[in-house]
């Protein structure tokens, strides 16, 4: 193989062969860039269709998380002296964590991954909450189940688009 490559590069036609290859690479790059050609493989996906689909997945996942967290905040029992602005701040911080997961594009339903994310959400809420009602085991279990449900739904949204 290397002998054949050496012969081609040292022949009289070497400049024409290299120009021909460069031309086809540039044409292929232009076709992919303008959306006329879409390439899908296990490692690389290129083309406008892929970018549009990825944007739609991320947007759908973010909308789901926003609606889910707003419903969670509305359904939680609020103790006396509850500050709605602090509650919204905690929800926004949780939303930021979910958006980070979504944009990193590595969400999984493995038990280890879910456990790490559950503990991260618990630590976040625990560090920002002053009420003892939100530090009970019952509340922590509810938040763990909610985090698991939300992560599983985010994975389902991605699967729906990838069918």
Image (tube, rainbow, N blue to C red):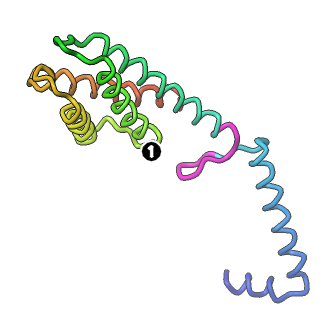
Q: Exactly how many numbered labels are in the figure?
A: 1
| Residue displayed at 86% across by 87% down | 11
The image shows residue 153 at horizontal and vertical percentages of: 38, 24
Quadrant in the rendering for residue 111: top left
| Residue displayed at 19% across by 14% down | 81
The image shows residue 89 at horizontal and vertical percentages of: 34, 27
Looking at the image, residue 29 sits to the left or right of residue 109; the answer is right
Quick check: 137 above or below 11? above
Give the labeled residue for mark 1: 104
Quadrant in the rendering for residue 2: bottom right
Looking at the image, residue 86 sits to the left or right of residue 137; the answer is right
From the viewer's side, name the closer residue of 30 and 55: 55
Q: What is the crowding at mark 1: few (fewer than 14 residues within 10 Å), some, or many (at least 20)? A: few
The image shows residue 88 at horizontal and vertical percentages of: 35, 22
| Residue displayed at 26% across by 22% down | 146
| Residue displayed at 20% across by 37% down | 123
Q: Is residue 43 magenta?
A: yes
The image shows residue 5 at horizontal and vertical percentages of: 73, 82
Quick check: 27 above or below 125? below
Q: Does the magenta stretch include residue 139?
A: no
Q: Give the range drawn in magenta.
A: 40-50
Q: What element carries label 1?
A: helix
Quick check: 75 above or below 35? above
From the viewer's side, name the closer residue of 53 and 22: 53
Q: Which image quarter holds the N terminus? A: bottom right
Looking at the image, residue 76 sits to the left or right of residue 137; the answer is right
């Amino acid at each position: 193989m290397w002998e054949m490559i050496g012969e081609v590069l040292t022949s009289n036609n070497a400049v024409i062969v290299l120009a021909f290859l460069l031309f086809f690479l540039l044409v292929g790059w232009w076709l992919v860039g303008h959306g006329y050609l879409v390439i899908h493989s296990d490692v690389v996906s290129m083309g406008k269709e892929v970018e549009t689909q990825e944007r739609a997945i991320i947007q759908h996942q973010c909308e789901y998380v926003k609606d889910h967290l707003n419903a969670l905040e509305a359904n939680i029992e609020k103790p006396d002296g509850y500050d709605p602005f602090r509650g919204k701040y905690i929800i926004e911080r949780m939303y930021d964590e979910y958006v980070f997961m979504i944009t990193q594009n590595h969400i999984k339903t493995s038990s280890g991954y879910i456990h790490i994310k559950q503990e991260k959400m618990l630590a976040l809420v625990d560090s920002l909450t002053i009420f003892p009602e939100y530090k009970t085991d019952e509340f922590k279990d509810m938040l763990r189940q909610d985090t698991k449900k939300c992560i599983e739904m985010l994975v389902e949204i991605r699967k729906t688009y990838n069918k």
